[in-house]
């Protein structure tokens, strides 16, 4: 029976860590070269069931650099070649889709997403740079497994969240819809969940977590008012579609009884759990959670 392998290409939220124009307390440590913090690029993973063919979950603006730093994704044979055979999207945000433009050099790649997410791409002509016969777009129905690569099953499911930032109004609705989804990946008898953006945990999500071996979950902010308290932003985490890590309504509490390996990903640059040895990091690790980092390998 084969292995299911996931490589963390990027572990940070939109903007990366440190964010290019931010001098918040956490970013300031990174700019100063403090060894307690490690820079991270914008969130995405690569998954394979055979170690040869790879699926990308999201395509961040940092994708080219992420490929350079991941030997498993390098060309191997022929003039034009890539082990990346497919991409699946969990949403239409810039930090989930801009990297698709890196894949415009006429390489065959299958792109999978819900019709709602594909509509976001279709509404922006810049994505017409992706040759339709090379980067083939496939609409995926929620809850219906597909097999994009040998031995790898993928199923999309709804997650509470909102529409992309550039499409939201003054008070965007936080709800379950086909524009913000999670991914269940299965291969070799193992299951991995990738949920980089979640405003809550539904009973259906919890049921999927019960049968998973590992869960990569939204770790954007440690506290809901984190960015407001630091004067780094004007929105709460929930307003942005992300439940906080800490607090009675946070993910530490919501996932406390999940027995799968639990790993936080999509971590904002202001989040103190990025600091090794911090109170926030100690609290997370004491609860049995891990913090994703670029280059992390998860083998199930």
Image (spheres, grey):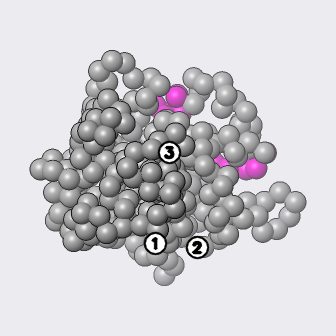
Instruction: Report if residue 127 lies within the magenta region.
Output: no
Within-10-Å neighbours for mark 2: few <14, some 14–19, many 20+: some
Q: Which residue is mark 2?
A: 50
Instruction: Report if residue 108 lies within the magenta region.
Output: yes
- Residue that lies at the very extreme toward the bottom in this rendered image: 1
As drawn, is 262 to the left or to the right of 53? left
Residue 215 placement (x, y as % from top left): 34, 62
Quadrant assignment, res 173: top left
**What residue is shown at x 17% (from left), y 63% (from top)?**
256
Q: Identify the mark nearer the N-term, 3 or 2.
A: 3
**What residue is shown at x 86% (from left), y 64% (from top)?**
78
30 w.r.t. 257: above or below: above
Q: Which residue is mark 1?
A: 298
- The span from disc 1 to disc 2 (Cα, nearest Å) is 14 Å
Q: Identify the mark nearer the N-term, 3 or 1.
A: 3
Element carrying mark 3: loop
Q: Which residue is mark 3?
A: 19
Q: Which residues are magenta?
A: 106-120
Callouts 3 and 1 close, C-beta under 8 Å: no
Residue 181 placement (x, y as % from top left): 38, 43
Residue 117 placement (x, y as % from top left): 49, 34
As drawn, is 200 to the left or to the right of 52? left
- The span from disc 3 to disc 1 (Cα, nearest Å) is 26 Å
Quadrant assignment, res 234: top left
């Amino acid at each position: 029976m084969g292995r299911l392998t996931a490589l963390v290409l990027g572990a940070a939220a939109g903007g990366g860590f440190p964010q290019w124009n931010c001098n918040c307390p956490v970013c300031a440590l990174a700019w100063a070269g403090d060894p307690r913090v490690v820079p991270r690029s914008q969130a995405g993973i690569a998954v394979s069931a055979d170690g040869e063919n790879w699926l990308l979950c999201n395509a961040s603006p940092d994708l080219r650099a992420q490929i350079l730093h991941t030997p498993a994704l390098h060309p191997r044979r022929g003039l034009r070649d890539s082990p990346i055979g497919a991409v699946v999207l969990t949403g239409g945000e810039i930090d989930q889709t801009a990297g698709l433009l890196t894949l415009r050099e006429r390489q065959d790649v299958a792109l999978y997403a819900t019709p709602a997410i594909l509509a976001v791409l279709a509404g922006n002509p810049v994505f017409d740079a992706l040759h339709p016969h090379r980067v083939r777009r496939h609409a995926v129905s929620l809850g219906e497994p597909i097999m994009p690569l040998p031995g790898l099953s993928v199923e999309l499911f709804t997650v509470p969240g909102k529409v992309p930032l550039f499409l939201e109004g003054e008070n965007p609705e936080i709800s379950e819809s086909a524009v913000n989804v999670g991914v269940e990946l299965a291969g070799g008898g193992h299951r991995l969940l990738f949920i980089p953006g979640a405003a809550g945990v539904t009973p259906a999500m919890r049921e999927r977590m019960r049968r998973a071996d590992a869960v990569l979950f939204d770790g954007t902010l440690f506290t809901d008012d984190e960015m407001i308290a630091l004067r780094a932003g004007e929105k709460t985490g929930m307003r942005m579609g992300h439940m906080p890590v800490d607090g009675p309504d946070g993910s530490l509490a919501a996932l406390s009884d999940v027995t799968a390996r639990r790993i936080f990903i999509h971590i904002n640059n202001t989040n103190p759990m990025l600091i090794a040895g911090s109170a926030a990091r100690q609290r997370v690790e004491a609860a049995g959670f891990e913090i994703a980092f670029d280059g992390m390998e998860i083998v199930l």
